[in-house]
Image (cartoon, grey):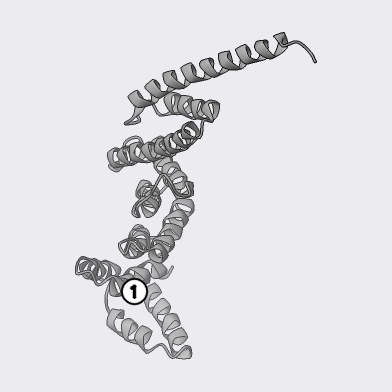
């Protein structure tokens, strides 16, 4: 059985050959730098670079640790840190790349002790950017699903409290979306549609910040619908009483 040191040398040699074929002077310099270091030292250097906000350079080192030791616990941590170097950027492209890596980690390592963190960060890659109730709800729904999966699978996770807080914020956005739709219907006198939306909010989002206004609006709409039906009924009776020509 090959020792870790021997494995490192073999992988270094293979990577060096690939770098030479692809004119990768940067990769060659990196391998020269890491040739005589153990994985713990490389990981520590990567972490130091990350703390200094040298995200691209730290990504190279974290990536090396993971690629060289993919089945080692430290390799798993390095895989998550590679994803972190993308997530920290907060733009759509980097958040998407981070999300793919966190999802891959959660699927690839279902028994890893840091899987809860991967699920948490899937949600964060959605909620890191401003989410609005008057836009497409797919990102809100995806974030909510990730946080809820974390809560269901890892009730003792250190990320539980923040995940629950995020769930509440996301549910507030979903309720606000339905409120906006209901208000549009009400203003356009589509009372029944507005009522259905508000009743849905009352049933599914009892902690919505406007729940008292929702309940008040439900009563108003029920009265308006009853009055409209009574007026229609009265008018119909009047028409039926009119003599035929």
Instruction: Choose between 194 and 199: the one closer to the eye.
Output: 194
| Residue 176 drawn at (x, y percent) | 39, 37
Q: Is residue 135 left or right of residue 238?
A: left
Instruction: Choose between 4 and 30: the one closer to the eye.
Output: 30
Relative to 75, does residue 164 appear above or below in the rendering?
above
Q: Which residue is under mark 1?
A: 60
Whether residue 65 can be seen here: yes
Whether residue 4 can be seen here: no
Residue positioned 51% across, 30% down in the render: 189
SS for tag 1?
helix
Residue positioned 45% across, 54% down in the render: 103
Q: Which quadrant: the C terminus?
A: top right
| Residue 228 drawn at (x, y percent) | 55, 19
Relative to 84, does residue 165 appear above or below in the rendering?
above
Quarter of the image for residue 164 reads top left
Q: Residue furthest front?
A: 245
Instruction: Choose between 7 and 146: the one closer to the eye.
Output: 146
Relative to 228, does residue 40 appear above or below in the rendering?
below
User: How many other residues sit within 10 Å of disc 1, few (<14), some (14-19) or many (≥20)?
Assistant: some
Residue positioned 43% across, 61% down in the render: 96
Q: Residue furthest right?
A: 245
Residue positioned 35% across, 35% down in the render: 155
Q: Which quadrant: the N terminus?
A: bottom left
Q: Is residue 24 left or right of residue 236?
A: left
| Residue 220 drawn at (x, y percent) | 43, 20
| Residue 97 drawn at (x, y percent) | 43, 63
Relative to 242, does residue 188 appear above or below in the rendering?
below
Quarter of the image for residue 35 reads bottom left
Q: Residue furthest top?
A: 241
* Number of numbered labels in the structure image: 1
């Amino acid at each position: 059985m090959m020792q870790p040191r021997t494995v490192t040398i073999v992988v270094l040699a293979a990577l060096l050959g690939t770098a030479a074929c692809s004119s990768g002077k940067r990769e060659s310099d990196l391998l020269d730098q890491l040739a005589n270091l153990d994985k713990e030292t490389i990981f520590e250097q990567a972490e130091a670079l990350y703390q200094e906000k040298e995200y691209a350079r730290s990504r190279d080192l974290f990536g090396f640790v993971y690629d060289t030791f993919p089945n080692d616990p430290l390799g798993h941590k390095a895989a998550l840190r590679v994803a972190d170097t993308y997530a920290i950027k907060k733009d759509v492209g980097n958040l998407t790349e981070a999300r793919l890596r966190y999802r891959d980690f959660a699927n690839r390592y279902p028994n890893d002790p840091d899987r809860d963190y991967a699920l948490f960060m899937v949600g964060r890659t959605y909620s890191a950017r401003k989410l609005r109730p008057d836009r497409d709800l797919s990102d809100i729904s995806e974030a909510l699903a990730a946080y809820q999966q974390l809560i269901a699978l890892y009730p003792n996770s250190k990320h539980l409290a923040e995940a629950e807080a995020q769930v509440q914020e996301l549910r507030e956005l979903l309720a606000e979306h339905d409120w906006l739709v209901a208000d549009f219907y009400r203003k356009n006198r589509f009372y029944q549609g507005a009522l259905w939306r508000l009743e849905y909010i009352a049933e599914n989002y009892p902690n919505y910040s406007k729940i008292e206004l929702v309940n008040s609006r439900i009563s108003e709409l029920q009265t308006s619908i009853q009055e409209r039906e009574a007026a229609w009924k009265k008018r119909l009776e009047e028409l039926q009483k009119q003599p035929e020509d």
